[in-house]
Image (cartoon, grey):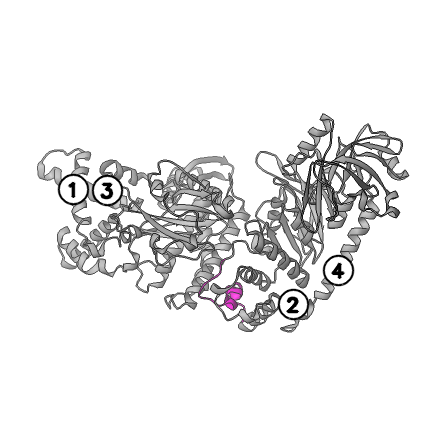
Amino acid sequence: MRYLFRPPATEAAALLSLPWEQPLAEWDPALLLDVPQRGISRHVVRFVAAEGAVFALKEIAEPLARKEYALLGEFVEEGLPAVSVLGICIDRPDDQEAILVTRYLEYSMSYRHVFSSPRSQYSTSKLLDTMVVLLVRLHLAGVFWGDCSLSNTLFRPDADGLQAYLVDAETVERRPELSAGMRRYDVDLARERVGAELLDLQFGELLSPEIDPIAVAESLPGRYEALWDAVTREEVFRRDEQRYRVAERLQWINELGFDAGEIELVHTPEGARLRVQTRVSEPGQHRRELFRLTGLEVQENQARRLLNDLRSYRAWLEQEGGAPVPETVAGHRWMSEVYLPVVQAVPRHLAGRVAPAQLFHEVLEHRWFLSEQAGRDVGTTAALRSYLDSELPRTPAELTTPAVLAGGPEPAS
Amino acid sequence: MASIEMKNIVKKYGDGFPAVNDVSLDIADGEFMILVGPSGCGKSTLLRMIVGLEDITSGDMVIGGTRVNDKAPRDRNLSMVFQNYALYPHMSVYENIAFPLRLAKTSDAEVDKLVKEAADVLELHEHLERKPANLSGGQRQRVAMGRAIVRQAEAFLFDEPLSNLDAKLRGQMRTEIARLQRRLGITTVYVTHDQTEAMTLGDRVCVLRKGSIQQVASPRELYEQPVNLFVAGFIGSPPMNFLPATVQGSTLETPFGSIELDEKRAAAVAGHDLLLVGIRPEYFEDASLVDEAKKHVGTTFTAKVDVTEWLGDQQYAYIPYEAPEAIRTQLRDLSRELDAEELRTQAIVSIDSTSRIREGREAEFWLDTRKVHVFDPESGINLTRDAEAGAELTRMATEDREEQVAGAAGGLTGGTPGSGSTAA
């Protein structure tokens, strides 16, 4: 047997003692972690925990495993939202298929959860839009998915929004640029898969009654086209308006979560023709900033929220002390005086249901809500107590992230 | 259902390299066409141009009489079968087949009719109310086929569908696909790199090499009348043997002795210095087991056997031979191009399983010289190909197919529910 993994992969060593020579379906349940609410897979998929981290193991044919290993590695390097791959095990005895090992995406939810819980805070519309953003991102990066479905997507809360991740790259093909046919094929397939997956939930009486699978599926191509058009279309406008029109367009693209790579402006008799080459870079400006100041690794919208809080804390410190406070000092103090006291206040039995940064965001939201009701600022301490008493317990226990189920510490993100 | 016509199809990528180069191919309504060749031959690209995944650089793609170059994949109404199918655990087998129709808002009566017809053809009737969890591997694949059937697509397309299955399921599915296609009479294009799949499944097989068609013919014509060295070497397992030869009058001198050519073939090879003789393994026999009455249609020679392989019902002997450097290089290049591993300077000879020929000893072999082909090593052209005899083989295959399609017509579509089973 051979194991291939990319350093740094210190976790890989902890996995080496697993019984790789046995068919995955026959592994001793004591070695496995039961992860509820997963999607549908054509393959045998199992979960294991090692050194506080959780891994997904998938048995697939070796050429597919090698391909997926390479692609997922590329995706993560380029900042495309995909699960992170650890490695593969090949040349298993008796011509068994290879096993692909990916890191479990902590605090992620499958569509089954999102669509099944009637009080889900995420609307169907938001979920579809998140998925469409993922598909557009992949397409801009020249990735033909070939198997876009809810089962192959994981969702992670990111402040007020959601972020979607690609989970399965078995059928992916990479091109310098995708043909319109490939994009449409992906969208058609997504439409059909989403429809079928929701119908399946309906047959299993797991779908909220207000959701119509067919209508939801049918709305997907239109949402995709609208976003694709927004980030890629060529525009023609008068020369005298070009300055603000270009700025407007770029801002709009940024707001949609994309970056402009190159801007081409051609003057023609009809006016200025603007072509924007949209790039998918990881929306990372706030993430990087927060990491620099606090060492926290969180998602982009969460980072924006946390940075805002950090900045107002710094302003308060300066006001109190009557002297400027360097941002690194402010970052350090905010961590120990504001952030950690909140996230460490979660009682053990509620741990792991919400990612720490998300929890912090939700406490801030709750504080705003309570303050508005009370007509005055209730303060973080009171908001935290109320949140832990009444809000957090409403997040279902089945959403507890597997690393915590496995007895590990709460992963940061 | 529809015919698929390709006219001068070219596919060039950004670097200007033609992945598909001037391909013209007519696939008849109801025909099972195989696109086969080693990796990089353009077969998958061609299929994807039919589906609409790849833009067509130039040429016309015509499906059912309509040019589809600019049509979106969905509007071409083709069905990619088993492409990453998923089975939905809460839905019955019935609903697992029906859901494309549900999404298209087809009426319940129509859904019921189409699903039941498909279930008949697929022999899934008794499983319709079950959940898919307890189906066997083969039955799961049949559910995937059921979905393709109820869509009433113009054609079925398969892109190496069996390459990731284990050997047992692969064999089973091959039979299943062949049976189903004959029964439905639906136009089918099937891409594979596996010549066994190509030979066993197709009405006709299109052999591609570096983006160009080499030959389109029935499996038997490809086997017996290949146009060139490439096709001759690609089709057949174990592969055709290629021996170096020189010609004097009507006699070929080979490492295995002289071969007499008839007048027609002698004329075709005249004027060449060095030639390659192509001999299928089964044209050889252990000379001691050949009927005296038959011996005169071939030649007898003695050679030392390197290895024998006895497989119960058949037996192979491996006979090394000498070849000039030019020929060795040629054969090495050919094996590389065919994705084959062996360098062919040993002949693989099929002998009767009762033969007592033993390894490491000299033995006497007989060679039926009537069917050998002679190739020009430079151009690879088969100098002795009998185009008429080849065409006759393909004509026979076409007649067989037309009979089957006629038998299937009305069996599935437009027939009363249940009548599908009478079409077999």
Which residue lies under the disc numbered 1?
A: A336
Instruction: Look at the picture and state if A229 lies above or below A209.
Output: above
Q: Chain of mark 2?
A: B
Q: Nearer the viewer, mark 2 or mark 3?
A: 2
Which residue lies under the disc numbered 4?
A: B402
Q: Chain of mark 3?
A: A
In the rendering, which numbered label is found on residue B412?
2
Q: Nearer the viewer, residue A301 or B196?
A: B196
Element at badge 4?
helix
Q: Amino acid at mark 3?
A: Leu
Q: Amino acid at mark 4?
A: Glu
Is residue B361 on the magenta stretch? no
Q: Which residue ends up furthest to the right in the rendered image?
A: B263
| Left or right: B177 as drawn, with respect to A324 | right
Rendering coords of residue A321 (x, y %) = 9, 37
Q: Amino acid at mark 1?
A: Ser
Rendering coords of residue B61 (x, y %) = 66, 49
Rendering coords of residue A135 (x, y %) = 44, 49
Give the Cα distance between marks 1 and 3. 15 Å
